[in-house]
Amino acid sequence: MSEIANRVHHYSSALAGSATAVGHTLESEMFFDTVAIKLNGISADAFVAMAAEHEMNVFKADEHTIRI
């Protein structure tokens, strides 16, 4: 079980690092499997629509924030 948890957190950390590397900010530095990202330069609606085109499940938290 801990191997699965470590893998999930590793993927979440990679996502968080990639998001900040391209100019977005994290809602919180503390997370386990769900990362809240405040978007820069794109609306949450536009991001969710693009993600859906790639069969990705992304939650719109507000106009500028998504959760993955």
Image (spheres, helix red, strand yellow):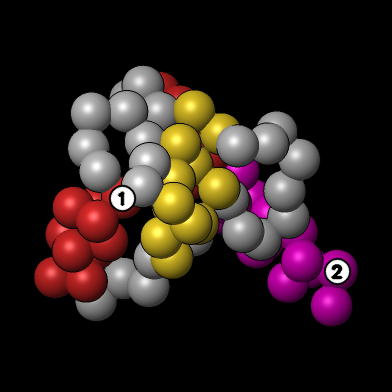
Q: CA distance from mark 2 to mark 1?
A: 33 Å
Give the residue type at disc 1: Ala
Q: Mark 2 = which residue?
A: 2
- At 18% from the left edge and 64% from the top edge, which residue is drawn? 49
Circle 1 sits in a helix, a strand or a loop, which is it? Answer: helix
Q: Is residue 40 above or below residue 44?
A: above
Question: Is residue 56 in view?
Answer: yes
- At 14% from the left edge and 70% from the top edge, which residue is drawn? 53
For the stretch drawn in magenta, the main secondary structure is: helix
Q: Mark 1 = which residue?
A: 44
Circle 2 sits in a helix, a strand or a loop, which is it? Answer: helix
Give the residue type at disc 2: Ser
Neighbor class of circle 2 (other Cα within 10 Å; few <14, some 14-19, many 20+) is few
Residue 23 place in picture, x, y as percent: 36, 22
In front here: 26 or 21?
Answer: 26
Q: Is residue 1 above or below residue 8?
A: below
- At 73% from the left edge and 55% from the top edge, which residue is drawn? 32
Q: Is residue 21 above or below residue 4?
A: above
